[in-house]
Image: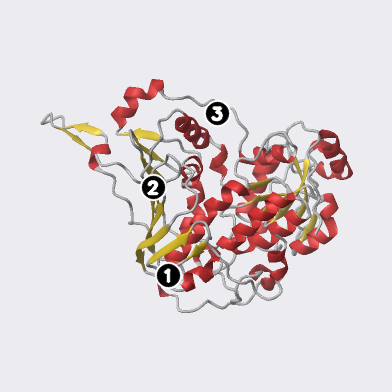
Amino acid sequence: MKFQKPDLTRRQFLKSTTALGALSILPSCVSPGNPYGTRLVSPNERVNLAIIGIGNQGNSDRKRLIDSGYCNVVALCDVDMEGAHTHEARYCHQLTSTLPKLKEGAPPPQIYPKARGFTDFRKLFDEMADEIDAVLIALPDHSHFSATMLAMSLGKHVYVEKPLAHTFGQCERMMRLARKSGVVTQMGNQGHSGANYFQFEAWTKAGLIKDVTRITAHMNNVRRWHGWGQDVTEYFNQPVPKGMDWDLWLGGAPVHPFSDRLHPQEWRSWFDYGCGAFGDWGPHILDTCHRFLNLGLPETITALKRDGSNPFVYPQASTIQFSFPKRGDMPACDVTWYDGQENKPVIEPEYGSLFTDPDTGKTTRNPVEINRPGKVIYAKDFVFQGGSHSDTLRIIPEEKFMDMRKSLPRISGKNSNHYENFLLACRGEEESRSPFSISGPLTQVFNLGMIAQQLGGEVKFDRVGKKIINNKIANALLDPAPRKGWEEYYKLA
């Protein structure tokens, strides 16, 4: 297959987008200054964007991409275009005095009246490939692969929600095709363009974060499957909603009946379709650790805890440990993941904040609070506590941080956000910060963790051969064959 080399020169880019310049005209319901408003960028300079998966997270991404002012929405695609969760991306619901009064029962005006709508991403590319520069893919985890591979094979830049793909082998192929096609790629771990990214980079270069031997990461918020997942013995079965293409929703994954425990948002609960709490939050918590500590892939993955384990649905609580070997002059490092509402790591008392009892004058330490998703990094000279997404690190105990805070490296904060970074990379003005070459190996760590959550026990991984060497069932889960009819996307790389 021939690949279209992405055009990054200014003249060629402008030429490629002129044909659809008119599509940037905003409907009357979009007024200046609202979240959908655009900056003063010429319509012909904007990236022509197709959105595949327009509900929930896809809708949130759409608003942020449009708010950047660097793109035109030219196509909307979703297997459930009439679902309530997709309406905000299609219709104006904030009516203004500039709109004519709607007839009773008439639908509100469309936000993008000249953008074409599709239920099948394959038809979208068949009919509009020449009119699209980039694609946002915000489908369930199991569906990222096929749409992304087809887009890259046609030379389209891709922004793919996290985690990058549902299996280790899918990530491997996506990285390979990204290199071959030369397109701009970005995974949607938005904090990778935020303060934590630049702080972690600066503190690593300054030698503050060095010789890390242990990391704990945790996400203890309630998950959708908590309370019911442990009792599942089969898939639920309900009528398919009118207008929904259930077979297309399934894609290359195993076939199971429709239910509201799968769509529109419950799919993350199930091994066959989602990546659980780890795949959902790991990209926001461990991304900078993985990148700047050059962790790569682990040698051993051990399921230390699997409360309420079930062959269909993720555990009610799990603790998974990853052992990464020595890397150059960096020592071996263990990363331990905790999920489940009460399954939290223990942080040693000496890292708590000082407290002096006013009555006795006795000074003790309060426990370190763990009340939101985050991580603790144990390095040679310091211990760091951080949150998720863009949250910055702080040195613990607190008095140590306060003593040296004025000497710590500073970051400006003057950088493009994750969405702007992707679109500017499409325009040839920046490099994307979470390309598949970076986000692919990160996601593969989650893929390995998911196998340990599903099977339990210890998994030994050959980092060179990229295979599991002590469990044939686990090794088969690295790269399961797709459902019949979806093999073609596996042959594109």
Question: Which circle's residue, 1 or 2, is located before the other in the chain?
Answer: 2
Q: Residues within 10 Å of mark 3 (few under 14, many from 20)?
A: few
Question: Horizontally, is 348 left or right of 372 in the view?
Answer: left
The dot on residue 53 is: none
N-term mark: 3 or 1: 3
Disc 2, SS: strand
| Mark 1 Cα shell of 10 Å, populated few (<14), some (14-19), many (≥20) | some
Which of marks 3 and 2 precedes in the sequence? 2
Residue holding disc 2: 333
The residue indicated by pointer 1 is: 455
Residue 419, by quadrant, is top right
Q: Please, what secondary structure does the residue beneath circle 1 have?
A: helix
| 3 and 1 marks in contact (CB < 8 Å) | no
Q: Position of residue 342 (x, y in %)?
A: 33, 56
Q: Check disc 1 and give the amino acid type.
A: Leu
Image point 43% across, 39% down: which residue? 329
Q: Position of residue 320 (x, y in %)?
A: 39, 58
Q: What residue occupies the far left of the structure in this picture?
A: 360
Can residue 196 be seen here? The reply is: yes
- Answer above or below: position of 381 versus 233: above
Location of mark 3 (residue): 413
